[in-house]
Image (spheres, helix red, strand yellow):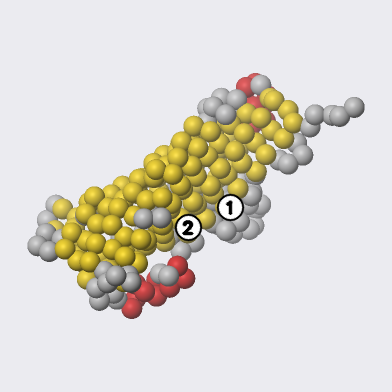
Amino acid sequence: MRVRRSVLTSVTAFLLAWGLGQEAGAGPSHGQPERPFAGLVIVSHGRQTIDLVTGLTVLPDGGSLVDRQTGVEVDAQVIRYVDGDYIEAAGVTVSGAFGEVVADALRIDVENSLLIATGELRLSRDGLVVTAASLSYHALEQVVVFDGGVTGTEPAFFADRLLLDTLTGDVLLDGRYEFAGDLFTMRSPAAGGRLQLSLRQSGDEIVYAATTEVSPALLERFRAYL
């Protein structure tokens, strides 16, 4: 006779397992340095199922995630995770140093400190609104890479790829691009090119200054992703 090795816990059992706050910590053991996403706390909005063989936990009613190290916060309609390995979520709103992101799906690779969002995603941060097919946040380096065709509405542009330095707010458009400035439009060569957008404060407004002369420092910052 086959024995079913997954269990469906009740809300009461869930509270006992995770504590009165319904929190599951994925932090490192004492004495070890904490890396991005290793200290995630997961809070359920309702039911959970746990597969005792694979360690997979599913929160079908959704929940929230908070990472102490990066400040990343996630609210999701459905969450699946294996403690210390990965987290997958659907119907997400994510906030962090990169801004606020709304996306269909999210995956966090805990070992590699990598957050990936996909599907109808939209990022908003000071002076920048971007839509793209996918977003990769490299938490150790604090760099965001947008792929799959990127469109900006504040300022107005499109590009094959976009790289964002979350520390400075500076942006690099990579590949084919078009940037609509106040006085003129800048376009890449047919084969593609690069355009630097530098964050500037103009009175009460945040604006981006565009230049095709990309600084060596910014190229070095993004070297691993170009």
Residue 198 location (% of width, % of height):
25, 65
Whole-number angstrom distance, CA of label 1 to CA of label 2: 10 Å
Residue 123, which numbered label? none
Residue 114 location (% of width, % of height):
52, 55
Which residue is painted at 69% across and 25% down in the image? 8
Q: In which quarter of the image is residue 112?
A: bottom right
Label 2 crowd bin: few (<14), some (14–19), many (20+), radius 10 Å = many
Residue 99 location (% of width, % of height):
35, 49
Which residue is painted at 49% across and 61% down in the image? 140
| First of labels 1, 2 by sequence position | 1
Can residue 125 be seen in this snapshot? Answer: no
Which residue is painted at 75% across and 36% down in the image? 52
Tag 1 secondary structure: loop
In the displayed image of the protein, which residue is found farthest to the front?
190
Give, as a three-letter code, the residue at label 1.
Answer: Val
Tag 2 secondary structure: loop
Label 1 crowd bin: few (<14), some (14–19), many (20+), radius 10 Å = many
Give the residue pinned by disc 2: 139
Q: In this view, does 120 lie above or below 50?
A: below
Give the residue pinned by disc 1: 110
Q: Which of 35 and 145 is in front in this view?
A: 145
Q: Which of 15 and 198 is in front in this view?
A: 198
Q: Which of 177 and 171 is in front in this view?
A: 177
Q: Is residue 165 above or below residue 99?
A: below
124 relative position to 36: left or right: left
Which residue is painted at 9% across and 62% down in the image? 183
Give, as a three-letter code, the residue at label 2.
Answer: Ala
Q: In which quarter of the image is the N terminus?
A: top right
